[in-house]
């Protein structure tokens, strides 16, 4: 049994801590803020490998996470739902490799697109059922599940990994701190933020999601949850601005209302901005230069929920047996 410290308590860090504990390790989590206060709490949290390079390992993790979330959707209190929806496709050369990670999907022509979704000529779509998470419920459930395994989650501003190694004396350390991971490790210049802004509207009775990543006016998605609809969005590489911009919000509302007219006039419930931790590729590997094993798991872009359980299992394999 190894003593392992996980730095980061977003969806990635908590899933890693959970799986390491299940594997028999003694685990603690250190994080500057709780999961629901992190960028994980801002996400629409729909299963889809967004803003991440769809490599073979990414698709394997996406497939494994899909299956795990599907199991959780059958358990009360997890906040996970299985919901049908449509990915709009505007470009004949669009990357649809993600379909290999879903059990079933159907290509739709323009005449088969969902009633109420307004699109331009020549747009097709892929219809499938995927998991989505009610972030406030799911992240609190996940936090409690980690605590139930005997894993303490401590609020601490980690500024130095070497100091953590010296003070906590773990046998191994896992860095899963999203955007802060690269700075903590100090050996990575490939990580950058992608600013995402969303507005949450009252739900007029929608149950199906729709995404339109290649909308010529900007990234557009509509993700209905139980009592609200997460509407987005933006994808601004390199922007560190975490303030809600009113003009950006109005542009989002124009796009989503054109796409799904049922949203016209719906009340704004809340609004938020998050910085997706993007990278040229997901970093999931051991890191040299320390006197004990250090592992990195970050750079998931907009796919943290989508890859979380699969990448947690990969970290467990890297760490080795208890």
Image: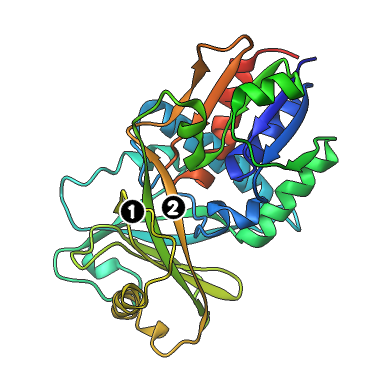
The spot of residue 137 in percent (x, y) is 69, 60
Task: Give the residue at mark 2.
Answer: 275
The spot of residue 286 in percent (x, y) is 52, 16
In the rendered image of this protein, does residue 297 appear above or below residue 248? Answer: above
Of circles 2 and 1, the one toward us is 1
Q: Residue at x 16, y 45 (%)?
A: 93
* Contact check, label 2 and label 1, Cβ < 8 Å: yes
Local packing at callout 2 (Cα closer than 10 Å; few below 14, some 14-19, many 20+) is many
In the rendered image of this protein, does residue 148 appear above or below residue 46? Answer: above
Q: Secondary structure at mark 1?
A: loop
In the rendered image of this protein, does residue 111 appear above or below residue 130? Answer: below
Q: Name the quadrant containing residue 170.
A: top right
Q: Name the quadrant containing residue 199.
A: bottom left
Camera-side residue: 99 or 106?
99
Alpha carbon distance from label 2 to label 1: 8 Å
Q: Residue at x 41, y 83 (%)?
A: 263
Q: Residue at x 20, y 63 (%)?
A: 123
User: According to the image, what is the colour scheme of the structure?
Assistant: rainbow
- Quarter of the figure with the C terminus: top right
Q: Residue at x 46, y 57 (%)?
A: 274
Label disc, if present, on residue 13 of the rendered structure: none
Q: Secondary structure at mark 2?
A: strand
Task: Give the residue at mark 1.
Answer: 239
Q: Could you tell whether 321 is left or right of 182 in the image? A: right
Camera-side residue: 232 or 28?
28
């Amino acid at each position: 049994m190894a003593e392992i410290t996980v730095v980061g308590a977003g969806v990635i860090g908590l899933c890693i801590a959970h799986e390491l504990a299940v594997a028999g390790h003694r685990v603690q989590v250190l994080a500057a803020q709780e999961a629901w206060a992190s960028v994980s709490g801002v996400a629409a949290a729909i299963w889809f490998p967004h803003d991440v390079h769809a490599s073979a390992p990414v698709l394997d993790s996406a497939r494994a996470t899909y299956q795990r979330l599907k199991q959780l959707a059958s358990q009360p209190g997890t906040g996970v739902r299985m919901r049908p929806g449509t990915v709009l496709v505007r470009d004949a050369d669009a990357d649809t490799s993600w379909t290999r990670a879903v059990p079933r999907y159907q290509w739709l022509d323009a005449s088969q697109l969902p009633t109420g979704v307004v699109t331009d000529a020549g747009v097709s779509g892929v219809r499938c059922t995927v998991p989505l998470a009610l972030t406030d419920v799911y992240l609190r459930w996940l936090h409690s599940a980690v605590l139930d395994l005997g894993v303490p989650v401590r609020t601490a501003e980690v500024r130095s990994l070497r100091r953590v190694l010296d003070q906590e004396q773990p046998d191994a350390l896992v860095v899963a701190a999203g955007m802060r991971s690269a700075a903590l490790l100090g050996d990575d210049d490939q990580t950058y933020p992608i600013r995402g802004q969303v507005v949450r509207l009252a739900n007029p009775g929608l149950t199906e999601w729709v995404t339109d990543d290649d909308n010529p006016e900007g990234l557009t998605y509509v993700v209905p949850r139980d009592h609200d609809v997460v509407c987005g969005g933006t994808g601004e590489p390199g922007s560190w601005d975490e303030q809600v911009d009113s003009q950006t919000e109005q542009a989002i509302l124009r796009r989503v209302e054109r796409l799904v007219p049922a949203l016209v006039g719906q009340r704004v419930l809340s609004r938020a901005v998050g910085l997706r931790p993007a990278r040229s590729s997901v970093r999931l590997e051991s890191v040299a230069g320390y006197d004990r094993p250090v592992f990195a798991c970050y750079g998931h872009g907009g796919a943290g929920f989508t890859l979380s359980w699969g990448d947690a299992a990969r970290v467990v394999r890297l760490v080795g047996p208890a």
